[in-house]
Each structure stands twice: as C-alpha cells, then as structure tokens.
C-alpha cells in the first residue's frame, strides 16, 4: 500500500499531535509494532522493528520512519495497489470504507491483545483486527474477524489475515520450496519490483510444494547471525497465499487463506475468522528469527512443547504392509534392546472384510485384522510392556478407500460430485472424507476415541493423510456454499482435533501427511511432532532438515535412521552419518533391526545412549546454523546450545568428497567467548577410536572467532560433539 502523502504532510507539521494517545505500541522483549487508530479514521501501521519504548514514538515520526500504511486496505474507494479485502455487498456495491470505531486492549493467559474494530461508514459491516503479543516470546501475530451485521448475505472475494509494510531496501526473500520427498528446501532471492507469490492449492496438505513461512531481509543477502530480518508464518493448514508486493519505495506482505476457488458467502449475523499471521523481527539475522519461532512453538504452538520426546522405531520401512504378530514382537524386542523407548506399528494392521495388504483398500475400517494379529492390540501392548517400551499405532482417519466397508455404508461421506465419476488417489481407490459434515467429524473423532477407550495404553498415534482434495464437491454443504469446501474442511478438522486434545491431552500425535505435507502452525498446536519427509536418505535430509529448522524446532522434527541402502535414493551411507543426521532432530529408527549386523546394533545402542544424554539440549536448546549445505563448501554444520551457553551439541556433515578437498573452518556462534569447553565425541565409529578433538578443552573465544578445523576425512564423514563449559 502506498504511503498517503496527505497524512505524511500532516505528520511532518504536527509530530507531537500525531504521536498522541492514539498510537498503540504493541511490544515483546525485543520487537515493537506501532498502530495508529484514531476514531473515524483509517487504521495504519506506523512501525515494525526492534523494540522501542513509548518515549521513542515521536522519534519514529520525526525521523520520517512512520509507514502510514493502511492496516487493512479495502477494494473500491482508493483502488490503487494490493488490497486486504474485497467484498460484494447485497446491493452489488464492491467497496468498503473501513474506519476505526473502537480499540480494546486486554490481557489473556498467554498474551497481550490489541483489538482494533473497523466499521464501514455506510454498511453494517465490521472488521475486527487483532494483534497478539505472546508473553515471553518475540512473536506478534495478527488476524481478522469479518462480521456481517446486515440482513442479507455478503460475498467475500478477498479476506487476508495480514497486510504488513516492510522497509524497502536491499530486500531478500527466503522461502522453502519442495516436492514430495524433497520438502522444505531453502531458496533465497533478491526481491525486485513486482510481485512474488508463495502459495499452494493442494489442501488438505499445504506444505509439500512450499511452506507457508517466509523471511524477508532488510539489508542485503540474508545471513545467519547478523542483519535485520522479518520472519512470518501463516498458521493455517489449508490453501494459503503469501504475496510480496514491491515497488521502488514500498514493500508489503499480504498473507492469508488462498481465496482461489474459495469465494466465501457470509450470511447475516455470521463472521469469518482468518488464521493468524505470526511474525518476528530479528537484528541477529535468520538465526534470531528461527530461535524466536522455536521458543514460541515450544511454549504455545506445539502440544506439550516442554516434554521430552521418546526415541522410537517405526515399522514402515522395516516391513511395509507385511504386519503380523511375530514380526511386530520381534521389532519391539530389538528396539528395546538398543535402548529405544517406543514402538510404532505403521500401516497394514487393519481391515477384516478387506485386509489392508496394499494401498488399494481398507481405509475407514479401523478394526484389527484378525488374520494378521490374532492376539489383537492387547497382545501387542502386552509385548511392549514386557519389553518395557511404549506402543504407538498408525491411522489415516480422514480417508477411505472405495474398497472398504466404510465406503459401502457411507458413499455420501466422501468428497465427490453426484454426476461425475470419482477421481481416486493412492492405490487407485483412495478418497477423502467430507470433514465439512458433522457426522463425518464424529466418525473421525471416533477413530481415535475408540482406539483409546479400548486400548488406553496406546501412547502415540501417527496421523497420516496421503491424498489431496481431487473431487471438489460436498454432499453436506448446500449448492451455494460449495466454494467453502477448502476452508470448511480445515475448520472441521480443527473441531475434531480440539475434541481429541480435550479428551487426550497427553497422547503423542504425529502429523505425517506423506511426510512433510503438514509442517505448518495451523495444525501443530494439536500435534506433538511432524514426519519431516518420507525420504529418509541421510544426505538429502541434511538439506530438508536445514530448511525445516528455519521455522520449526528440533523437538518436533521426526528424523529416523533408515536402511542401507536407502529405500528412496538407493544411497549407501555409513550408520554413523545416518545417526548423526537423525540425532539433530527427534531421533527415531525406520529400519528392520533383524537385518542389522551385530556391530551395527552395538553402534546403534551407543548412539541412542548418547542421544539420551544430549536430548534436552537438542529438543529444548537454541539452534545456531553454522555452515549451510547450500553454500556448497562440502560441509554442513549446526549446533544447539542451552540458553546459558554452558552445554552444546555440534553436528557436522561432509556433503561432498574429493581428493585434496578443503574442509572449511567452523566458527561456533552458540558459545560464550568467556568460557572454556570440554569436547566429547558422542558417536565414535568405534568406541575406542574417538575423534582427535575428544577430551580437548578449548576457549569459547577460539571456538567462536577462530573456529574449529574438524577431522572429517572419508566420504560421508560426520561428527556429533558435545561441548561442556568447564567450571
Ligand atoms: C505415508 C507415510 O509418510 C509413511 O511414513 C507411511 O506411514 C505410509 N504412508 C503408510 O502408508
């Protein structure tokens, strides 16, 4: 949105008046957002950046740094530039004239909230804008509630969550593009004039193609620990649209639900609440943005974000659909012997009329396949208990196969169109249940509830979703509301998850979605973690986990050691490299233990024990990315440190291998220069052959400023080192 020259002139002539009580300063420890909201006038964003105090507000104006950017520009009256909202009013008028009616400020258990109520000057139409400063974090979020107070429906064509001005300069965009099996790959580009749009249309999984999260640097190519960077994420699991609109002098971020094919009809007396756009401002580069989001996630946006996650074995790549009692028992015994804490039985355990032997049947029939598991879930849980580990199970409750008893009973529960053949997904028969329908919501809730009431010992659920919405048609929604499907699907899913969480707050649930498809803050509040990617290849994971780490904390990032050779890429990689990569997230295994050699089992046992030792640092510590795999230096490195910088874990991975190769020095940004650190090799390839740095005590100043020359020699060499500050 262009600055308003009229108001700008006013600003210079009446600085004190403008910096009056009608300025609302919304602050966290290190950031501030300044809103100007005078009754009867448009509301504007004046400042977003490092924290300022009330006494500095007039300086923002005096320095000519106020944005004067309409906080929620509407189409139709001042029709230049991008808009946040466009409607069709009952008389056909497409304009809105939104002015401030009232501002409320209040405190909730988790935040300080400022609510700016905008009303149209003529029509009974209200937009409530919320700004939420989360306590103890540096995240401020914003969203709107759009209310139709009239007596006829209003059509919403555009309804963004946020319209945020950014200081124009040498701005760069960081975003996280991907595909299935190659999710969340960091891309960076200079923002030139025009528009750059990050969006998706693949509901109900929105993160395979591009994550709904961006960073924008204000002062050149983004760096890890220096530079001014804004980070933002849309907390929405459905289709999203993040638009960067740049001219010579202005840059605006417009973020919200993707309105394509989603025209929304607001009936009289009804409202639509848009998802949160959460953002932070960092003066310490991208690293500062990541650490702020990780803290926010652990405190507010992840189920039980302060509880340690278990080390697990998942059965998928070990047996695929060939689930049976003896096989599951053997896997449980093996993971327990290696020190694991949880076993998860993946796909293939259910269906009696149609046993689930491949992807073509049974979704919806959530009963144990008696042929495969004659002792039922109880038998498996008893085995888990005998092995002193927990038991978890896979489900895909939003889906059905046309070859299932559920579909035979309820063909109308599936998203489809009565007069057209069904488009089907995986196995040629997979379809999606219509979560706009409350009866379907009850069914999906019941899938979890039935499992948990019959087997309350189930400690973990892997919640999968392997299909996009292909048949755009609901038998529940009326004809004039078919364009609500994408939005109402997610609202329905949220209702189900709220019920599950109300009843089962301590059940660990993983958001899987073909790996990587549901890495977003729309769903994470209901989940404990996500499955980062179906691709478990350790080398490719270095890149995917690097990208994912920008907005999502290690505690949530499911990261599993898998077979050699890897099932997705066919790559052969040492077990140590595979462990060192998986240990930088929530460690697990995705392997058939009975195929591992005795030597590998010994290594795995030691690595699992080492992970347990440093788990609190990885899962609750601060992340410092040190050397990017995208810099093509042949090395990638990152570290986690406690906030006091007294303990840290360093990970380093050789990503290429040549004769006479130069291995770059690694400077450890997450240490205290005034401390001395003892180094321990956490995962030596042989227990009696620790790396040359093991046992050394090195000053933080040298580690940070001069750096470490790491002993990384062979192909796929890697290191996991613990650093402990000396008393
Ligand atoms: C896709 C998931 O991402 C895999 O981990 C596995 O659970 C399969 N689905 C099972 O069908």
Image (cartoon, rainbow, N blue to C red):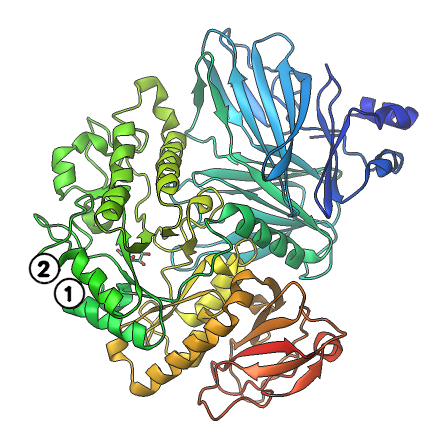
Q: Nearer the viewer, residue 557 or 472?
A: 557
- Spot occupied by residue 128 in the image (x, y as percentages of width and height): 59, 23
Q: Which residue is mark 2?
A: 374
Above or below, 264 against 614 in this view is above
The answer, for residue 432, to whether it is visible in the render is no
Q: Is residue 352 left or right of residue 689?
A: left
Q: Residue at x 70, y 61 (%)?
A: 225
Above or below, 442 against 448 in this view is above
Q: Which residue is mark 1?
A: 325
Dividing the image into four equal quarters, which quarter contains ligand 1?
bottom left
Disc 1 crowd, CA 10 A, few/some/many (<14, 14-19, 20+): some
Q: Residue at x 68, y 74 (%)?
A: 667
Q: Nearer the viewer, residue 701 or 109?
A: 109
Q: Residue at x 12, y 54 (%)?
A: 369
- Spot occupied by residue 81 in the image (x, y as percentages of width and height): 65, 28
Above or below, 135 against 103 in this view is below
């Amino acid at each position: 949105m262009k600055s308003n020259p009229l108001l700008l002139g006013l600003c210079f002539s009446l600085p004190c008046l403008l910096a009056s009580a009608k300025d609302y300063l919304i602050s966290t420890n290190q950031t501030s957002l300044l809103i100007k909201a005078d009754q009867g006038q448009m509301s504007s964003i004046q400042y977003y950046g490092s924290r300022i105090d009330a006494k500095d507000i007039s300086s923002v104006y005096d320095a000519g740094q106020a944005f004067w950017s309409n906080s929620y520009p509407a189409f139709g009256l001042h029709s230049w530039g991008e808009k946040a909202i466009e409607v069709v009013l009952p008389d056909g008028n497409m304009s809105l004239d939104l002015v401030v009616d009232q501002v409320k400020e209040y405190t909730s258990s988790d935040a300080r909230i400022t609510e700016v109520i905008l009303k149209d000057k003529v029509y009974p139409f209200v937009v409530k804008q919320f700004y939420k400063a989360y306590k103890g974090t540096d995240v401020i979020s914003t969203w709107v509630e759009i209310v139709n107070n009239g007596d006829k429906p209003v059509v919403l064509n555009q309804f963004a969550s946020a319209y945020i001005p950014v200081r124009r300069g040498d701005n760069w965009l960081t975003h996280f593009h991907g595909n299935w099996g190659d999710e969340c790959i960091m891309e960076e580009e200079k923002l030139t004039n025009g528009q750059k749009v990050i969006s998706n249309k693949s509901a109900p999984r929105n993160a395979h193609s591009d994550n709904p999260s961006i960073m924008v640097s204000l002062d050149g190519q983004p760096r890890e620990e220096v530079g001014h960077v804004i980070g933002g994420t849309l907390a929405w699991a459905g289709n999203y649209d993040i638009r960067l609109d740049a001219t010579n002098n202005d840059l605006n971020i417009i973020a919200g639900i993707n309105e394509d094919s989603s025209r929304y009809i607001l009936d009289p007396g009804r409202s639509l609440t848009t998802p949160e756009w959460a953002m932070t401002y960092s003066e310490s580069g991208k690293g500062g943005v990541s650490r702020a989001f990780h803290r926010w996630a652990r405190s507010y946006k992840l189920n039980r974000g302060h509880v340690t996650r278990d080390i697990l074995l998942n059965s998928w790549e070990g047996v695929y659909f060939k689930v049976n009692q003896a096989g599951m028992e053997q896997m449980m015994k093996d993971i327990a012997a290696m020190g694991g804490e949880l076993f998860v039985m993946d796909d293939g355990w259910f269906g009696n009329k149609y046993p689930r032997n491949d992807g073509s049947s049974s979704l919806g029939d959530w009963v144990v396949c008696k042929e495969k598991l004659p002792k039922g879930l109880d038998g498996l849980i008893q085995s888990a208990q005998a092995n002193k580990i927990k038991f978890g199970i896979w489900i895909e409750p939003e889906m059905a196969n046309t070859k299932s008893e559920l579909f035979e009973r309820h063909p109308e529960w599936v998203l489809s169109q009565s007069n057209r053949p069904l488009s089907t997904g995986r196995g040629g028969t997979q379809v999606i249940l219509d979560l706009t329908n409350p009866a379907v919501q009850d069914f999906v809730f019941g899938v979890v509830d039935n499992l948990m009431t019959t087997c309350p010992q189930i400690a973990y659920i892997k919640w999968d979703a392997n299909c996009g919405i292909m048949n755009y048609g609901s038998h529940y929604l009326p004809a004039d509301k078919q364009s609500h499907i994408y939005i109402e699907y997610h609202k329905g899913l949220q209702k189900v998850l709220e019920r599950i969480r109300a009843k089962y707050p301590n059940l660990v649930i993983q958001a899987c979605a073909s790996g990587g498809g549901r890495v977003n803050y729309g769903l994470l509040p209901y989940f404990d973690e996500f499955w980062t990617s179906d691709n478990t290849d350790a080398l490719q994971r270095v890149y995917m986990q690097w990208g994912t780490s920008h907005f999502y904390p290690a505690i949530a990032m499911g990261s599993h050691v898998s077979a050699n050779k890897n099932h997705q890429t066919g790559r052969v990689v040492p077990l140590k490299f595979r462990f060192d990569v998986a240990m930088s997230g929530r460690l697990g295994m995705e392997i058939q233990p009975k195929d591992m050699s005795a030597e590998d089992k010994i290594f795995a046992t030691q690595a699992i024990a080492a992970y347990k030792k440093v788990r609190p640092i990885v899962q609750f510590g601060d992340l410092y990315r040190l050397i990017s795999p995208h810099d093509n230096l042949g090395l990638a490195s990152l570290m986690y440190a406690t906030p006091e910088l007294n303990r840290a874990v360093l990970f380093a991975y050789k990503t290429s291998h040549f004769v006479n190769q130069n291995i770059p020095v690694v400077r450890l940004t997450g240490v205290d220069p005034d401390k001395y650190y003892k180094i321990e090799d956490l995962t030596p390839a042989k227990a009696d052959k620790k790396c040359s740095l093991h046992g050394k005590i090195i000053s933080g100043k040298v580690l940070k400023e001069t750096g470490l020359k790491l002993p990384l020699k062979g192909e796929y060499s890697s290191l996991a080192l613990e650093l402990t500050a000396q008393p």
